[in-house]
Amino acid sequence: MTHPELVLCELPDTGLVEVESYSPFCLKVLRACRAAGLPVRRQHAGRPGAWRHHNPTGQVPVLLVDGEPVADSTRILARLESLGGRSLLPSEPRLRAEALLWEELADTALNAFLVASRWADADNWPRTRAAYFGAAPAPVRAIVPALLRRRVIASLVQRDVWRAGRGACWARFAILLDALEARAPADGFWLEARVGVADVSLFAQLQGLRTALTPVQRAAVEQRPRLCAWLDRVDRATRAPPGVGRLGRSAA
Ligand SMILES: N[C@@H](CCC(=O)N[C@@H](CS)C(=O)NCC(=O)O)C(=O)O
């Protein structure tokens, strides 16, 4: 079967093979395409709003399916199911529902900790600022990062992640990591023997916490051996084959 042409509109490549994007939602879609065996071409822009002509919310990722834009990682993964690749959803209805619940947990609760670690935590913010805005013109660098940071922190307070402060945030994060460590599969993948929606969704957020931008949170993840062994399995199963460049087509 011939596959549709897929183009992933996203942010710049990080240059890290284990975390190709600092956007966990772009990473989720990229790894899902590979897990499904669907070749995808990556297109990069310096800021999410650059793709607003494809997505009025101004967010990434957007996947162009034969030129038709599909926005939001959850909608994109649902759409992948009809594109002729391998299904990433279990066929058994209860497991299928569970996969979507894990996706929701990853996209909401885990994502909030990832955003807090990079934007709100004062220790990590200088590294985040350099990675996200280092290439921007000096006048932009002088104004935009601080404005955006204020807005992101306000949203984290609204989401109750940062409302009680830094100590409470990281204490709650540790409890969630402990639960994930206890639940992580000893072998295979999160719900089945092959990589699925739960794997790529949880992987994208947790792997995003394992970069040099957030060393304390990376150490917290890496103190959980079962979780890390599973993350490494997902990484190996969905990583770009050697020799595929950032603008190249990445196949399963
Ligand atoms: N629910 C969306 C969330 C996407 C999202 O938050 N994307 C971030 C980058 S990781 C973004 O575009 N942020 C810019 C903004 O919200 O204005 C999804 O699952 O795709």
Image: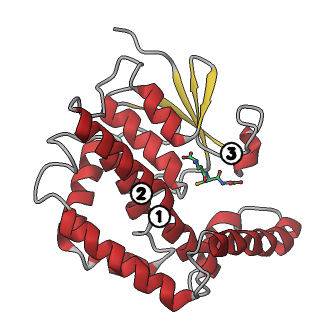
Q: Are the residues flagged by discs 2 and 1 in contact, CB closer than 8 Å?
A: yes
Determine which of the numbered discs, if any, sits on residue 168 in the image: none
Q: Is residue 13 above or below residue 140?
A: above
How would you rate the neighbour count of disc 2 (Cα within 10 Å): few for under 14, some for 14-19, many for 20 or more? some
Along the line of sight, the residue nearer the viewer: 185 or 41: 185
- Name the kind of residue labelled 1 in the image: Ala
- Name the kind of residue labelled 3 in the image: Ala
The spot of residue 79 in percent (x, y) is 47, 26
Residue 92 appears left or right of 46: left
Q: Is residue 40 above or below residue 148?
A: above
The spot of residue 201 in percent (x, y) is 39, 50
Residue 221 appears left or right of 227: right
- Name the kind of residue labelled 2 in the image: Leu
Determine which of the numbered discs, if any, sits on residue 45 in the image: 3
Secondary structure beneath dot 3 equals loop
Along the line of sight, the residue nearer the viewer: 158 or 59: 158
The answer to which of marks 3 and 1 sits earlier in the sequence is 3
Could you tell me which quadrant the C terminus lies in?
Answer: top left
Secondary structure beneath dot 1 equals helix
Q: Going by the picture, which residue comes out furthest to the front?
A: 94
The spot of residue 237 in percent (x, y) is 25, 44
Q: Which residue is mark 2?
A: 105
Rendered residue at 24%/40% (across/down): 95
Locate residue 110: give its quadrant: bottom left
How would you rate the neighbour count of disc 3 (Cα within 10 Å): few for under 14, some for 14-19, many for 20 or more? some
Disc 2/disc 1 C-alpha distance (Å): 5 Å
Secondary structure beneath dot 2 equals helix
Could you tell me which quadrant the N terminus lies in?
Answer: top left
Disc 3/disc 1 C-alpha distance (Å): 27 Å
Nearer the camera: disc 3 or disc 1: 1
Determine which of the numbered discs, if any, sits on residue 109 in the image: 1
Rendered residue at 53%/76% (across/down): 117
